[in-house]
Amino acid sequence: MVVVNARLSEEVDSVTTYNVLKFGAVGDGKANDTKAFVSAWEAACNKTRENAKISVGSGKTYLVSEIQFQGPCSSTSITFEVTHPFAITTQIHLIKKSHNWKYFIFSSTQILGNIVAPPRSAWQKKGSNEWLYFHRVDGLTVVGERQGVIDGRGETWWKNGDSISRPTAMRFSHCNRLEVRGLKHVNSQMNHVSINGCKNVTVSDLVMIAPSESPNTDGIDISNSIGLRIVNSSMETGDDCIAINGGTSQVNISNIFCGPGHGISIGSLGKDGKREEVEAINIRNCTFNRTNNGVRIKTWQGGSGFARNINFSQIIFIEAKNPVIINQNYCPHKICTEKTSAVNVSDVGYYGLRGTSISKNDATITFNCSKTVHCTNINVDDVDIKSAGSNQTTRSFCSNAHGKARGLMPALGCLLK
């Protein structure tokens, strides 16, 4: 071992470690450790040698206020490692060869630590849009073992509803070749994870938990991103488990357990007359347990653009309220003005959907499309959704929807050719 700086860093096998405790972190869950995290990140990010590691000592709970991990970095490699018995270890690896960023994952380290946010009353910047923010860091890998907790303390924010600006718990902005794996999130202030402006993203083995009545606590919100794979995760939230917004394409989602929550949504798209585009979305092998909605496409009247080439396959519903929805007339307000323009919804497939519904007044399958911009090429095959109640039946509703259907329960005779 060669000690580079006895106070701040040490070098082992050409990897320089920056321990946040040596930058002033306390780790008692009471003292604010934000400055120590920032200082350790800056030291590692600005390192000009090949490898650097930020170490967050074991046996600690770190109170961290809103913080931005800004890239790009000079270091060839950065590992961000948080360890704690009963919590979460996080590793971040950045690899750069010449001027081309690539990512590399070092040997696995168990993630066992707690990162907690301050309560709303102690929030330093009341208008902050995010708590933990990674910006322009290419080749970033954040790894956990689903044992620890990233706790947003959202319960101190929810009682105010939408009357205040609430931050996203963890945001990734313009991070290409991103991997997020094995993290556990609880009680986010608003949505748990946001992915914006990113390319080539893999998300896996996440656990997200928030009460069903917690407002707008989406699991993962995606926007303006290309090439995402989201797999093997469990999401129990107060809103959408996953929401796919405008500017997003080439998304593959599989093996997601969703519920409670509002299901997986494409949209909403086209709000305030906006043009938005979503395409090449594949969602398969997912389970929706007592969700308000299952698989949903929702667009506002007055918008433009398209939602196309979207497939839902091998889906299981367990007492879902509204299992299958296309709504081109989305409007959650009491008074909604009818408009002629709409986001074009086309080339949507539903294959091998099974399970039960608790829909009473609402249809089990709903295709509510625009009068002026009809839904086209909707294909439904091998769908069997029964009522969870012994004395209830399921039904379908279509309006201005064109497509083909076969092998269905409930019957879908309302599709236009």
Image (tube, rainbow, N blue to C red):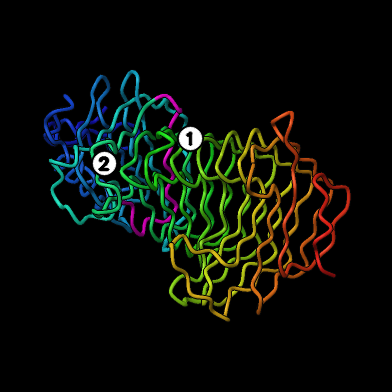
Report the magenta stretch's main SS. Answer: loop
Element type at mark 2: loop
Q: Earlier in the sequence, mark 2 or mark 1?
A: 2
Q: Quadrant of residue 143?
A: top left
Q: Amino acid at mark 2?
A: Lys
Q: Amino acid at mark 1?
A: Glu
- Viewer-side residue, 378 vs 105: 378
Q: Position of residue 54 (x, y in %)?
A: 28, 38
Which residue does the numbered mark 2 point to in the structure image? Answer: 159
In the image, taking residue 384 as reference, residue 342 lies left or right, namely left
Q: Residue at x 28, y 36 (%)?
A: 155
> Which quadrant would the C terminus be assigned to in this image?
bottom right
In the image, taking residue 266 as reference, residue 53 lies left or right, namely left
Q: Determine whether 31 is above or below 331 in the image.
A: above
Q: Position of residue 398 (x, y in %)?
A: 73, 61
Q: Which residues are magenta?
A: 133-147
Which residue does the numbered mark 1 point to in the structure image? Answer: 236
Q: Are marks 2 and 1 in contact (CB under 8 Å)?
A: no
Q: Residue at x 67, y 67 (%)?
A: 308
Q: Nearer the viewer, mark 2 or mark 1?
A: 2
